[in-house]
Image (spheres, rainbow, N blue to C red):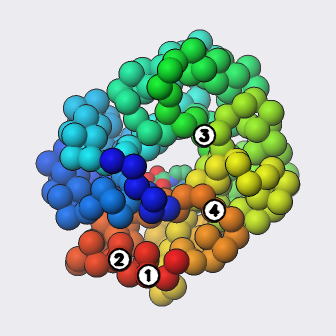
């Protein structure tokens, strides 16, 4: 089932039963779901298949970052699973991203391919510590431009950068934005946060929301409350 909702719910759970209990409370017409490192490491492709069987489009958020051959093969394996979107780290560089694009281009049915720019949990001081002496906005723009040149479908970034990226890179480039926090929500470990309505206003294509929905007493109501603000 293909949803028109911009919301992607991050299923960050320790095992498949916990993730499926959450999925049972969600409607594939109202959101997509994201499988990340914790759930995929514990439960593997079977949980992706189970979610797809329930009608969800799945963003496989494993943020591959390796040499071109290894990363392209991993992206190919994700495509075999039938996921809706898969991602790599833009920091893996041009040759890595082009290898991933090339391997997917040979397929009739391919997932969307996006690249992570700068994690939304990082701020300027964090970048400085790893030798990047510029503002997140500047580094995100640099990596997003490279990602577009390599022929990928879009980037993962903070919605704080979405307006500048939308203006610079056009309407067809996907901006997938985690770090979404409804007003009054806890930021948790996120740093570059934005409210759902502001994210859409800034030009985000998809809003990735985890704990504000999955830790809510009534997740389906939390999702509906977010959708109502958009
Ligand atoms: O820059 C990034 C890239 C990925 N994520 C992932 O999104 C969700 C966010 O979950 P919340 O509970 O809403 O904070 C999580 O799965 C991250 O791995 C990100 O946050 N930032």
Q: Position of residue 55 (x, y in %)?
A: 27, 47
- Residue 218 lies in quadrant: bottom left
Secondary structure beneath dot 4 equals loop
Q: CA distance from mark 2 to mark 4?
A: 19 Å
Residue at image mark 4: 204
Gap between marks 1 and 4 measured at Cα? 17 Å
Left or right of 127: which side holds 31?
A: left
Q: Which sits earlier in the primary sequence, circle 2 or circle 3?
A: 3
Give coordinates of residue 150: x percent, y percent: 75, 29
The residues tagged by marks 1 and 3 sit, at their Cα atoms, a distance apart of 27 Å
Give the mark, 1 or 4, whose residue is nearer the N terminus: 4
Residue 155, given in percent of the width and then of the height, sits at 65, 46
- Foreground pick, 37 / 33: 33
- Name the residue that disc number 2 marks: 224
Label 1: which residue?
A: 228
N-terminal label among 4 and 3? 3
What residue is shown with label 3?
A: 114
Mark 1: secondary structure: helix
In the rendered structure, are the residues bearing label 1 and label 2 in contact, judged by CB atoms less than 8 Å apart? yes
Kindly identify the residue that appears in the image at 57 percent across and 15 percent down.
106
């Amino acid at each position: 089932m293909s949803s028109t909702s911009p919301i992607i719910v991050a299923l960050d759970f320790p095992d498949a039963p916990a993730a499926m209990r959450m999925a049972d409370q969600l409607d594939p017409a109202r959101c997509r779901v994201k499988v990340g490192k914790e759930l995929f490491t514990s439960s593997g492709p079977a949980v992706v298949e189970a979610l797809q069987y329930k009608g969800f489009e799945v963003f496989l958020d494993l943020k591959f970052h390796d040499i071109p051959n290894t990363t392209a093969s991993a992206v190919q394996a994700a495509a075999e699973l039938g996921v809706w979107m898969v991602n790599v780290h833009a920091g893996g560089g041009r040759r890595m991203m082009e290898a991933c694009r090339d391997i997917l281009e040979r397929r009739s049915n391919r997932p969307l391919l996006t690249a992570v720019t700068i994690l939304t949990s990082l701020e300027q001081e964090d970048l400085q510590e790893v030798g990047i002496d510029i503002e997140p906005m500047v580094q995100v723009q640099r990596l997003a431009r490279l990602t577009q040149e390599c022929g990928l479908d879009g980037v993962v970034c903070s919605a704080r950068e979405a307006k500048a990226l939308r203006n610079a890179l056009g309407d067809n480039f996907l901006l997938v934005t985690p770090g979404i926090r409804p007003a009054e929500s806890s930021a948790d470990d996120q740093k570059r946060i934005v409210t759902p309505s502001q994210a859409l206003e800034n030009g985000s294509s998809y809003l990735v929301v985890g704990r504000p929905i999955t830790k809510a007493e009534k997740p389906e109501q939390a999702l509906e409350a977010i959708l109502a603000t958009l």
